[in-house]
Image: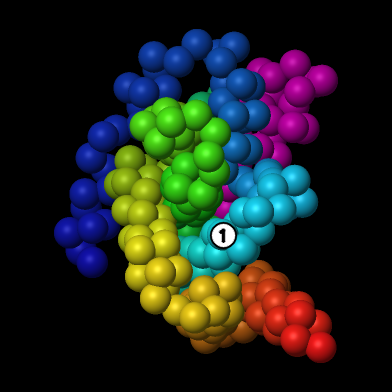
Amino acid sequence: YIALAVTRGVGAIGPIQEAIPDWLAIGFGFLTQLGDGWFLLLLLAVLYWNRLRLQVDLLVLVGTYVAGIGLYRYSKAVFALPRPHEPLLDPELVPWLFRLVYELTASASGYGFPSGHATSSTIVYFGLAAVLTIGTTRQRYAVAGGLAALVSFTRVALGVHFLVDVVAGVALGAAVLIVTFRGIRPLARDSVTAVFLLAVGTSALYLAESDASTEAIVVCGLALGLVGGWQLVVLARHV
């Protein structure tokens, strides 16, 4: 734990931010949303309703994503390591038309290790690369890697994460994805239920570690809602 706290300063944020012109700061504020929860859930929902043949795989990916949320939030609560809080650009220097959006997108609160954006973008984009059939496999994984790297870079550039935070987030996301797509999906009779139950388990860890915080209750409620909703679908299919 001590070594982790010390090495968080490796890969200083200052030189990265100094190399970025001010006019790009607003763009990074928007680009970082590619790894935000609202965007990823919207993306998965749109694909679910438009890719009927892939709905089961997409549900497995949704469960993996929620499991990842519970796990990275649990990890944040366990390590309790602060963020750098080194904003890329003073919000007062941002034109008033974009200031509110910049403040909302380019700032973050709570603990910083591991990066939730890096974890989530790794799970969703690499998961989609495994599920979708657009282009070649190499092209899909190249795009997924580019998007995950872009999101991770914006978190460091915006000054809300250290480099080690996003590296750990990518590693955590990859680990969760491997467990579900290489382990649970091929072996479980009902892979959707199995992955949803995994999401319940990780969210329960977060709930316990955070002393039942509001966010933990919401994540746990989402996981339980997925399990309950899917069981209703399964029952309806057998009626």
**What residue did someone put label 1 on?**
57
Question: Residue 89's spot in the image, x, y percent?
Answer: 56, 24
Predominant SS along the magenta part: helix
**Is 116 in front, or is 23?**
116
- Residue found farthest to the left: 3
Picture quarter with the C terminus? bottom right
* Magenta-span inclusion, residue 51: no
Q: Which of the two residues, 228 or 6, is positioned nearer the viewer here? A: 228
Residue 134 seen in this snapshot: yes
- Specify whether 200 is left or right of 84: right
Figure coloring:
rainbow
Vertical arrangement, residue 77 with respect to residue 236, above or below? above
Residue 221: quarter of image: bottom right
Above or below, 61 relative to 137: below
102 in the magenta segment: yes
Relative image position of residue 179 (x, y in whole percent): 36, 67
The answer to whether any part of residue 85 appears in the image is no
Residue at the (80%, 20%) spot, across then down: 96
Read off the magenta span: 90-109
Q: Where residue 135 appears, x then y in whole percent?
A: 50, 29
Q: Is residue 207 above or below residue 150?
A: below
**Residue shown at 69% from the left, 19% from the top:** 94
Direction from residue 222 to residue 58 in the image, left or right: left
Mark 1 element type: helix
Residue at (64% x, 75% y) in the render: 223
Mark 1, other Cα within 10 Å: few <14 / some 14–19 / many ≥20: many
Figure check: 212 above or below 69: below
